[in-house]
Amino acid sequence: MTLHLYTGNRMEILADALAGVLERNVPSVFESERIVVQSRGMQRWLSMRLAARFGVWAGADYPFPNKLVQQLFDWLDLRQADSATFSKEVMCWSIMRLLPDMLDRESFAPLLSYLHNDREGLKLFQLSGRIADTFDQYTLFRPDLLETWEEGRDDAALDWQPELWRALATESSGKHRGRLKTEFLLKVKDATLPPGFPKRISLFGISYMPPYHIGMLEALAVRIPV
């Protein structure tokens, strides 16, 4: 199966197209239809539209894109108990703990200059939050860069980011989103999909998705036989 793309500039037309797909492939009453949306407002509007079309519409699941990714990892049993160590919030506190002991290294000179006279630790907290947010974006948009750093293949530039990331990755046995996607693509290609794995995943009203999500959906498209 391939991905089927429906485009239009009116939500009513797209909702009718989705309803047509659902009519041609009616799910079991024991199965939850999975429709990915980007807002709860869109969820409510679409639910009412489908209810008006079918008379009754219930039991559907409306995950946001990142929630769908988490569900896919869980279904294939890829997550680890301490994978949360790579959340932005946890990374922020980890960076606050690790960074002061690394500031004497040459590559950290820019950060040392910024944190000069930070007696209350406010600058350290704010900087750690910004770095954590950047690293979190790397796991989504540049997992290849993180893999290069983790393998030590960053000798061309003297930079503090690879050193700090390696320190974070070394102290955790969990998996960040980049690693999880790599394992997902390998496992979904060859493994038997577990019971309860969705037979169809629809996306509605989403104008943009990162390549990270699209790559996972492309891999699924050849495995879900509906």
Image: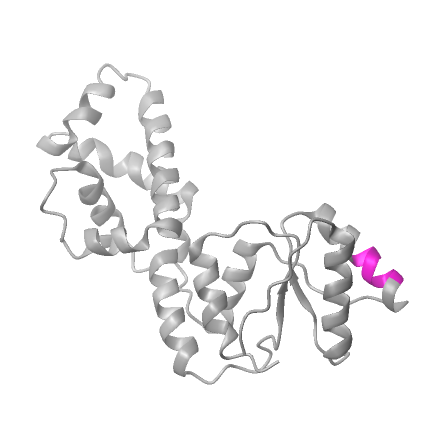
Q: Is residue 139 magenta?
A: no
On the image, the x and y values in percent for residue 175 come to 35, 59
- Left or right, 107 with reference to 139: left
Instruction: Tell me: 54 left or right of 122.
Output: right
Residue 132 in the image, given as x and y percentages of width and height: 36, 39
Residue 21 visible somewhere in the drawing: yes
- Position of 196 with respect to 151 (left or right) is right
Magenta portion: prevailing SS class:
helix
Region in magenta: 47-52
How far across and down, in percent of the image, does residue 22 sit?
74, 72
**At 9% across and 47% down in the image, what residue appears?**
155
Q: Quadrant of the C terminus?
A: bottom right
Residue depicted at 41% across the width and 79% down the height = 189
On screen, residue 152 above or below 105: below
State the image quarter where residue 55 is shown: bottom right
Q: Quadrant of the N terminus?
A: bottom right
Residue 48: within the magenta? yes
Quarter of the rendering containing residue 163:
top left
User: Residue at the front extreme?
Assistant: 8
Q: Residue at x 10, y 44 (%)?
A: 156
